[in-house]
Amino acid sequence: MLALWAGPAAALPTDFNDKVEAALLCRSEWSTTFWQDYFTKHLQASVRDWGEARWWNSQNAQLGGVPSTEVFLNLDDSRALMIGALLEQPVESAKKTLEERYRLQFKPIQTADGVRYVSDTLSVLVGTTDQKTKWYCAKWNMGNRERVQPLAPKYGPGP
C-alpha cells in the first residue's frame, strides 16, 4: 500500500512579511514576474486563477499585524502591477490595526460598488461580503517609465 505524506509547508523566508507589506503599501517597484516567481517559490503552487488574478495560500502570514489567508497578483503585467492579500478581519478592524502599525491614514472613498479606504501611497482596503478585507496596491503602467529625457524644455544659455 502506497501512503502519501504531505509534510508541513516550508517556512516562509524571514523577509517575506517585510517584502509583501512594502508592496501592499505601494512602497516597492517589483514586477509581476518577480512576484509570480517569489510566491511560487515560497508559497508553492497557486490555488486558483480568478478575477484576472492568481491566488496563493499565504500560510497564515501576519501582514501588517493582521492574519492573512491568501495573497494575489494580477496575471498580466502589461497594464498594471496589482498585488494584494486577503485578511481575516473586517475592514474596520484591519484598517485600525494597519493605521496604528504604520502611522498612516486610510481615507474613505465612495465608489460605485461601495466604500474603499485609500492611503496617501494609494494602498487600498476593501471590505468583503464575508467580513474579510482585501488589502492591495495597484500601479498602472502609464507607458512613461522608459523615458530618458524630461518633457520640459531646457532653459538657460543655448549650446
Image (tube, helix red, strand yellow):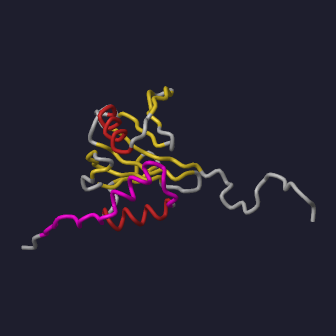
For the N terminus, which image quadrant? bottom left
Q: Nearer the viewer, residue 150 or 136?
A: 150
Considering only vertical position in the picture, is 71 above or below 35? above
Considering only vertical position in the picture, is 103 above or below 147? above
Total numbered labels:
0
Q: Nearer the viewer, residue 45 or 150?
A: 150
Most distant residue in the right direction: 158
- As for residue 153 lying within the magenta part, the answer is no
Residue 11: which quarter of the image?
Answer: bottom left
Name the spot of residue 94 as percent of width and height, x first.
Answer: 32, 38
Horizontal side, residue 117 vs residue 62: left or right: right
- As for residue 21 lying within the magenta part, the answer is yes
Residue 154: which quarter of the image?
Answer: bottom right
Q: Which residues are magenta?
A: 4-30
Horizontal side, residue 69 vs residue 134: left or right: left
Name the spot of residue 20 as percent of width and height, x first.
Answer: 38, 55
Considering only vertical position in the picture, is 45 above or below 26? below
Name the spot of residue 117 as percent of width and height, x first.
Answer: 44, 34
Tell me which residue sits at (17%, 64%) in the image: 8
Q: Main secondary structure of the magenta part?
A: loop
Tell me which residue sits at (42%, 54%) in the image: 22
Name the spot of residue 134 as percent of width and height, x first.
Answer: 37, 41
